[in-house]
Image (spheres, grey):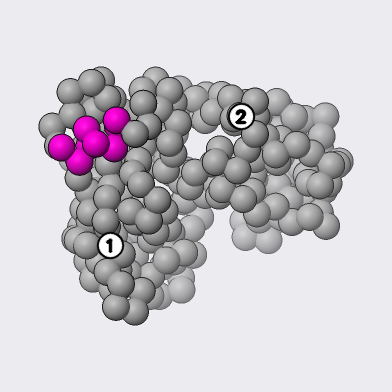
Amino acid sequence: MTKEKSQIIIAENVHKWYGKFHVLKGVSLTVNRGEVVVLMGPSGSGKSTFIRTFNALEAYQQGKIIIDGITLSHDLRNIEAIRREVGMVFQQFNLFPHLTVIQNITLAPIWVRRWSKAKAEELAKQLLERVGILEQAQKYPGQLSGGQQQRVAIARALAMQPKIMLFDEPTSALDPEMVREVLDVMRSLARDGMTMVVVTHEVGFAREVADRVILMDSGSLVESATPDIFFTKPQEDRTRQFLSQIL
């Protein structure tokens, strides 16, 4: 496998401003196929903004982003092609409250991939079984716990059969006892070789599942290392200071 083929996300010197606020200051990152990268850092460090540039939920003003060989541009066809490859799970679930669980999951495959309802529902049931809530298929999101809603959100993202999954603090809105059920689903995805970029403060998950852990602060990448080095022998003072507050 050539080096280019193995790199599924390439971000080079990405800058973003909100007005005069420089939120991303020349961030560069490459992610290989099947790799799990965890982004950590204080609130406001640019982590969520950075991963949202990968599927054009956030625009950026300078630099280059290439997703699975497609260079991100302002061309809508280009953005749609990238979004078909990239699934995203948000902090606040973002499910449609007026649709049942199975309708939430089948909506995009039917409309975007032009699948038949039967084909989409068959896949949706397989995904609900995979995330452990097949019995909730006909319920509405409001009838589910937070952990169950987030597992529906993961199944919905997987229904588009993406090559990359982005997770933006997927457990931060959950009660502590619900966190594990969502992390267990994410662990199984990692074991199956899904490329994942995860913004999280879940240290246990990062230690166990991540291939690399990255600290972001003030719009820049501070340190990137394997979990064993990141958590036990960090090189940067800023990383040591951050870890002293969360460990």
Q: Which x, y percent locates residue 154? A: 60, 40
**Disc 2 secondary structure class:** helix
Q: Residue at x 49, y 44 (%)?
A: 169
Visible in this render: residue 47? yes
Q: Quadrant of residue 21?
A: bottom left
Vertical placement of 161 versus 74: above or below? above
19 or 134: nearer the viewer: 19
Quick one: label 2, few (<14), some, or many (20+) residues within 10 Å? few
Q: Earlier in the sequence, mark 1 or mark 2?
A: 1
190 or 169: nearer the viewer: 169
**Disc 1 secondary structure class:** strand
Tell me the magenta residue range. 237-244
Give the labeled residue for mark 1: 24
Vertical placement of 11 versus 18: above or below? above
149 or 134: nearer the viewer: 149
Asked if residue 65 lies in the magenta stretch, the reply is: no
The kind of residue tagged 2 is Pro
CA separation in Å, label 1 and label 2: 31 Å
Taking the view exactly as shown, the residue that stands out farthest to the bottom is: 19
Quick one: label 1, few (<14), some, or many (20+) residues within 10 Å? many
Vertical placement of 220 versus 57: above or below? above
The dominant secondary structure in magenta is: helix
- Mark 2 and mark 1 in contact (Cβ < 8 Å)? no
The kind of residue tagged 1 is Leu
Q: Which x, y percent locates residue 115? A: 69, 52
Q: Quadrant of residue 23?
A: bottom left
Task: Give the label on residue 176, or none.
Answer: 2
Name the mark nearer the viewer: 1 or 2.
2
